[in-house]
Image: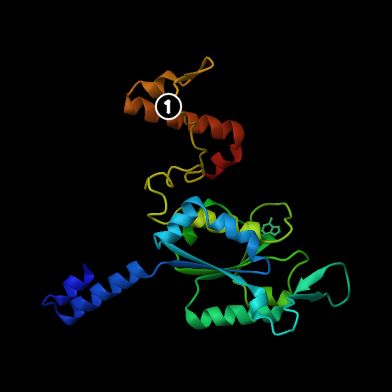
Amino acid sequence: MYLFLLHQDCTIWLQKIIITFAKNKLNIMRIDILTALPEILESPLNESILKRAQEKKIVEIVIHNLRDYTTNKHRRVDDYAFSGGAGMVMEIEPVDRAIEFLKSERSYDEIIYTSPDGEQFDQPMANYYSTVKNIIILCGHYKGIDQRIRDHLITREISIGDYVLTGGELAAAVIADSIIRLIPGAISDETSALTDSFQDNLLAPPVYTRPAEYKGWKVPDILLSGNTKKIEEWKMQQAQERTKKLRPGLLEKQ
Ligand code: ADE
């Protein structure tokens, strides 16, 4: 379509607008994930909706093995902590080399480090990142990373909850998943991402499918009534009741 328009007798400025528009359309979101354990990320990011989003060129996810950015013979990415203490610490060099290489190819909106110390990830953050172009996620490491990475290379630290995982890979997968499903076209039902729990600080109402009755357990009559207005009212009332009962704190955020 764009090529067709360019063949028309249009002025230079109009051609420029068309090219910029086409470029924006083609410039898909890119998520680069840096990890010493790429295998952990392969499966969660290559199934179902995320797999299709990549096939449809809605997003490009590139997993980088930090060992590929090492200069030592053993491809080691961690070392003993100065001052001792249990556990190995991720070295700055492979991380810096990886980030420098990526930044030489394109600009990034955010360089995230997954860590239990970080800001708590939530739906508004996922909404925001679904609108940006390129992000890097550096997966945290068992006993932490050299502080200079956090001070000089990272732009935001994010936690997915107040508990400690063995590494940041699962956190990176959670963050990437929640962002990608919000990108237009990732989910076939355009409205469904907007009606998720948390989008308006309300939990989603219950849903049912056939059969209408199973072992005597019935689907609420209202859902079989065909009365769209009444069904919408019921859903809203259910969402409010569930939120009040299960997550009252969310109502205060409204
Ligand atoms: N790495 C270890 N625990 C984590 C958490 N809760 N969130 C993000 N990254 C982590």
Q: Position of residue 241 (x, y in %)?
A: 53, 29
Left or right, 98 with reference to 212:
right
Residue type at mark 1: give it. Answer: Trp
Left or right, 52 with reference to 140:
left
Q: Position of residue 86 (x, y in %)?
A: 87, 67
Question: What secondary structure is found at the residue carrying circle 1?
Answer: helix
Q: Nearer the viewer, residue 127 or 105?
A: 105
Q: Nearer the viewer, residue 214 or 182?
A: 214
- Categorize mark 1 by other alpha carbons within 10 Å: few (<14), some (14-19), many (20+): some
Does any portion of residue 51 appear in the rendered image? yes
Which residue is the extreme one toward the left? 9
Q: Position of residue 229 (x, y in %)?
A: 33, 28
Q: Residue at x 64, y 80 (%)?
A: 69
Q: Is residue 3 above or below residue 250?
A: below
Does any portion of residue 152 appear in the rendered image? no
Q: Quadrant of ligand 1?
A: bottom right
Q: Nearer the viewer, residue 148 or 94?
A: 94
Q: Is residue 171 above or below residue 92?
A: above
Which residue is the extreme one toward the right? 84
Left or right, 1 with reference to 209:
left
Q: Residue at x 62, y 82 (%)?
A: 97
Q: Quadrant of the N terminus?
A: bottom left
Q: Which residue is mark 1?
A: 234
Q: Position of residue 106 (x, y in %)?
A: 47, 78
Q: Residue at x 52, y 38 (%)?
A: 203
Q: Residue at x 88, y 69 (%)?
A: 85
Q: Is residue 193 above or below residue 148?
A: above
